[in-house]
Image (cartoon, helix red, strand yellow):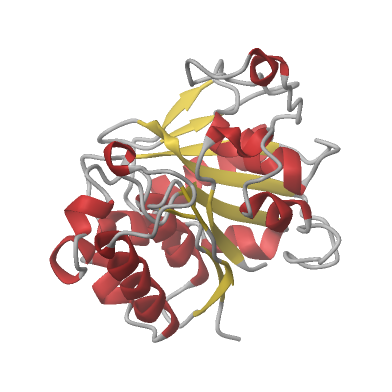
Amino acid sequence: MDTFFLSHGAVTLSVDETIPARAFYKSWLPAAIAGKQAPRAILVVSAHWDTEATPTVNVVHGTNDTIYDFHGFPEAMYKLKYPAPGAPDVAERTKKLLEDAGFGPVSEDHGRGLDHGTWVPLMLMYPDADIPVCQLSVQSGRDGTYHYNLGKALAPLRDEGVLVIGTGTATHNLSKMGPHDAPVPQWASEFDTWLKDSLLDGRYDDVKQYEEKAPYAKVAHPTPDHFYPLHVALGAAGDESKAELIHHSWTNASISYASYRFTAKN
């Protein structure tokens, strides 16, 4: 299967029909973006689960809880549910692949459900919530190369019917958001364009070292948690994969919803 990096942007994507990316997510099944055959399970690497130094998987038997890891939003958002079954077998397989590749020890969390970086896009992509889902954490104390190599260790999952998704945001500086109708600032536009050009041209080493290579890297990502899921998804597709921009839009002037498909070389 192809792997994907999806910019989930604002949590209001779950309810706000005016967010342009919402139509993209709702088209996921009708347009067969991940293929006509449904995945056996979904592994999500979300920006909203950061374990700093060592990887952790959520091993859930039964139904995943819906985590409301946000504050100050409309009450209706706290009533949304995404009761997807857990994927304990995929979580254990993920743990083994990572430990065999030298990323151990990998911890298990048996009580954590799905954070909004996972359930908000999935509720639009797979609204029936009938596909098993598990999560893998990012480690903000590591770098892009580490996360790329972590993704490479997960490559066998693609051949086992598991859809590997990284969710974050292509540009993520909440202190610099503006009105929806404001022009995109230079720093956001230049970083976003650099990312697109680097991925489509196959300059993956530059993407791994984005803090040194990208314009305005520290402005676009003051912390790396919303960018590392891209490295994992990219690594899971392999060194010679092909990147494709599958959606691009903006909200709040500086939040890019740029999303990418990574196709492994045959």
* Whole-percent x, y for residue 123 in the image: 73, 38
* Whole-percent x, y for residue 2 in the image: 63, 68
> Residue at image x 19%, y 61%?
216
> Residue at image x 57%, y 61%?
4
The image shows residue 182, relative to residue 238, as above or below, that is above
Q: In the picture, which quadrant includes the C terminus? A: bottom right
The image shows residue 71, relative to residue 196, as above or below, that is above
Left or right: 180, with 3 as reference point: left
The image shows residue 188, relative to residue 175, as above or below, that is below
* Whole-percent x, y for residue 141 in the image: 21, 40
Q: Which residue, as the protein is rendered here, is positioned at the far front?
A: 181
Left or right: 27, with 107 as reference point: right
* Whole-percent x, y for residue 93 in the image: 58, 44
Left or right: 183, with 218 as reference point: right
> Residue at image x 78%, y 45%?
126
Left or right: 2, with 56 as reference point: right
Task: In this rendered view, identify the residue nearer to me: 25 or 74.
Answer: 74
Quadrant position of residue 194: bottom left
The image shows residue 112, relative to residue 167, as above or below, that is above
